[in-house]
Image (tube, rainbow, N blue to C red):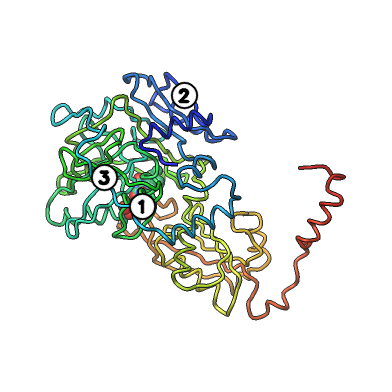
Amino acid sequence: MIFNDLREYIAKLQELDEIKSIDGASCELEIGAITELASFRKRCPAVLFDSIKGHKKGFRVLTNFLSNRLRERMVFGVSNELTDPEAVLYWKERLKHYEPVEPVEVKDGPVKHNVMVDDQVDLTQLPWPRWHQRDGGPYICATSSVTRDPESGYINIGSYRFMLLGKNKIVAHIGSGHHGDVIRKKYWAKGKACPIAISLGQEPSLLVAAGTNTNWGVSEYGFAGWMRGAPVEITKGVFTDLPIPATAEVVLEGEMLPPSAGTEIEGPFGEFSGYYGGGARPAPVTMIKSILYRNDPIILGSPPFLGASRGILSSRGILVWNELDALGIPDIKAVNYSWGMCIISLKQAYPGHAMRAAHGAIAGTAGYHGRFVIVVDEDIDPYNLEQVLWAVATRCDPESSLDVARRIWSYKIDPRLPKQKKELGDYTGAVAIIDACRPYHWIEDFPATTQIAEELLKETNAKWGKAIGED
Ligand SMILES: Cc1cc2nc3c(=O)[nH]c(=O)nc-3n(C[C@H](O)[C@H](O)[C@H](O)COP(=O)(O)O)c2cc1C
């Protein structure tokens, strides 16, 4: 299904009764709280906020736009007929055959229908929600932010949050090691500001691409084009010459100033870890020089709430799995990555197989920022945390099956990183490897599980299932 812009996507959600409209909510905590409430509802509807208190009618905010099975499948182009494990396998294989669909440049686009430049720039005209109670200010948190590597010309897009400071001033949180951070530091090293174009809303596959940890050099525009099966239309910005999505709802263009030009406090912000791990810290500011927007623009909001599902297809587990495949580690059955825990299920084929997989996950790109890698046998479903805990409790010997890898790439929003380390800029942490597989060298002697064979269960269900009632 190809959506040419966010509006076509919303129209589809309306047709499928996947979206609720709310008029009159306030940016001050109300939009955030409604979004969280909605994300705990069974169908987890998308929510489109209009007539937002203090803002022009038509200046809208869309939340929960991806966070249920049907919507995720639509954007990823994966059939809703597939079971979850089938969908994971399908997407994993598709990713292996990824071929960029390069964007096409157009001279103009709806994003340029309205342009504010220089003194006209007034970010406060846009709705900036304060999402969570302890947030230090209003945030836009589902951006697709475009920068250009000054050495190679590589165009990178990442999703970073920005806090509103004034009419033309915002402050970013970009994790260290993220490509956007690497790029801006190259400009700063030369005493220059880093140009940036920040799309606040567009067809959702670009946000998925921006939020996916693709390798350096991979074009997120190419990735989004590949995902949606059609090239993204891009056009040049008016302040920067960066390529911006032509059908975007709003694009802010400006410069990320070097830290030497002064800093402002960024944060705290309720982060995806479920904590205010990053706290409030001085950060370099971004000055906005132009705002381009469509009539009645729609801003995406994807505030991290504990209830807001990030879906199985956007989970980093699939990427970790492909990285393990690329390392030539065989017989991986499934990989789940959630809450900084990477759970790998594999059929052990040789001594050391489980540890090789664990180290591969730590060393790769997608399994980063974790605290635990748990390796389980193939009979354990890594998405079923009860089964995983059972394996840990019964197959892992604390004396010989635990390891700790130290000084591993972490990040400043890690809630468990001591304050002193953060102050020193030492964003490295420890990752525990829990080998919860049956010991390979006496696997044949390991007690059999009491689990009744699947075939027998099936036969029994066919014969007696009715008598015990349906689920
Ligand atoms: C909705 C959303 C919000 C995100 N917010 C941030 C953020 O504020 N800062 C950050 O560094 N990464 C954030 N991320 C994760 C990055 O976008 C992601 O790791 C991305 O691959 C980084 O891109 P880059 O390496 O090209 O810079 C967010 C991801 C999503 C999907």
Residue 299: % across, % down: 35, 32
| Residue at numbered disc 2 | 21
Which is in the foreground here, disc 1 or disc 2? 1
Disc 2 packing (10 Å; few <14; some 14–19; many ≥20)? few
Q: Amino acid at mark 1?
A: Phe
SS class of the residue under badge 3?
A: strand
- The residue tagged 1 is 223
Name the residue carrying label 3. Answer: 282
Does the beta carbon of the residue at mark 2 sit less than 8 Å from ligand 1?
no
- Above or below: residue 236 compared with residue 100: above
Q: Residue at x 55, y 67 (%)?
A: 332
CB atoms of marks 3 and 1 within 8 Å: no
In this rendered view, identify the residue nearer to me: 231 or 202: 231
Q: Position of residue 16 (x, y in %)?
A: 53, 31
Say if mark 2 contacts mark 3, CB within 8 Å: no
**What residue do we see at 19% from left, 56% from top?**
153
Percent across and percent down for residue 447 are: 75, 72
Q: Could one spot residue 203 in this view of the protein?
A: yes
Q: Amino acid at mark 3?
A: Pro
Query: Is disc 2 placed on a helix, strand or loop?
Result: strand
